[in-house]
Amino acid sequence: MRLIDRYLLRQLAGPTLLATLALTGVALLSQSLAGLDLIVNQRQSGLVFLKITLLYMPQLINIILPIAVFVAALVALNRLHTEQEIVVCFAGGMSRWRVISPAMRLACTIAFAALVMNLFVQPAAFRALRQELFEVRTDLASTLVREGEFTEPVPGLTVYAQTVEGDGDFGNLFIHQEKPDGSSTVYTADAGRIDRRSGRTVLLMENGTTQEFSERGVLNYLTFNEYAYDLQAITNSDELIHYKPSDRYLHELFFPDLTQDWERRNRLSLLAEGHARITTPLYNIAFMALALSAIIGGGFSRLGYARRIATMGAVASVVRILGFVVQAACEDSAWLNVLQYVVPLAATAVGLRSIFRQRVSRFIDIRRRPAAALGAAA
């Protein structure tokens, strides 16, 4: 029997892995298209783009896993049942539970892996992602100058560069600065780059001029070979990284710091996210039970199981959408978090009930054979 268990497990594990990889690839493709703004507008390197895309993977995989389990189980079980391998298992004396136990063990293993990702991997990845996005957003070179555009990084300061090289060098630089006293200064330079001088961030300009208009309208014109424009006023920022509910660990979701105004106002959202971290892995078990129900929950059919598969596919879609709806509703009412557990557990119960409601018939009852057949046998 152990040999049959391992065989059934292998037949299910292969399609599950392939379906997970395929769906993850599609999700990463869509995510990468959305992140092209980092390269096009923010002028970040391909390494930064790849890092941000990969840091999204734990959440993407957790969303994809139940779908991959459902699709792979349908494909594998439909083939096994159509080729009568499952029928042979029943005829050999295996119970329904013994037949479905490899699939359920696989679903429980996947659910445990998803739980580990939800509790530990996703928060760590999303915190690193938030740090990376913060650095991109506060990247001085990308916010200060954009090729061929007039930008205003801070009020009163206008910057233009005709060209921006890949190594961060600027060509044909123009800066217009308005001072609080009403005077203004114009800087032009053939080249420029962001640099550090005496511990301060500066825009180092080469081969340029300065034109300053005083309050009296007097023009002061100077030329320079090298001039360091102080950017300290731009780089000083009191902005801090804010961790969203998806970035927090489980204890931070269930026990927020209520002395913080944001956490006090969003306590229900944090609580809903915490329960969702625990319940979403259960959808892997629920979807496996629904897939088993679609194939094994009814009698054998040589014409296939398209109708039952379509029905269970619709049920699985409704169950997952209902889970998202319940999670959103829990942000307004704490007691609704109970329903986050009820939805996947109820779906699992429905799937298993349809599997076990029919008894396996291994013997032909001679008393139920038609009279004509009995006469022919005589």
Image (cartoon, helix red, strand yellow):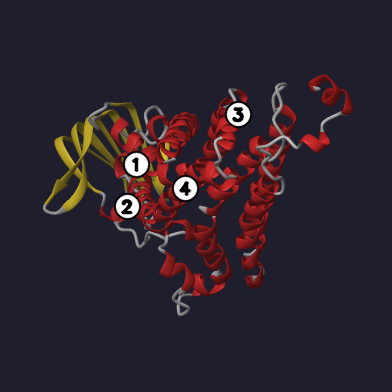
Examine the image and state in which quarter residue 369 appears.
top right
- The label nearer to you, 4 versus 2, is 4
Label 1 close to label 2 by CB (< 8 Å): yes
Q: Determine which residue is flagged by label 4.
A: 105
Q: Residue at 57% x, 30% y: name it.
A: 88
Which residue is nearer to you in this view: 25 or 290?
A: 290
Q: Is residue 104 above or below residue 207?
A: below
Q: CA distance from mark 3 to mark 2?
A: 67 Å
Q: Determine which residue is flagged by label 3.
A: 81
* Dot 4 or dot 2, earlier in sequence: 4
**Where residue 350 appears, x then y in whole percent?**
69, 51
- Look at the numbered disc 1 and give the secondary structure of its residue: helix
* Dot 1 or dot 2, earlier in sequence: 1
- Look at the numbered disc 2 and give the secondary structure of its residue: helix
Residue 234: mark: 2
Which residue is nearer to you in this view: 131 or 240?
A: 131
Within 10 Å of disc 3 (Cα), the crowding (few <14, some 14-19, many 20+) is some
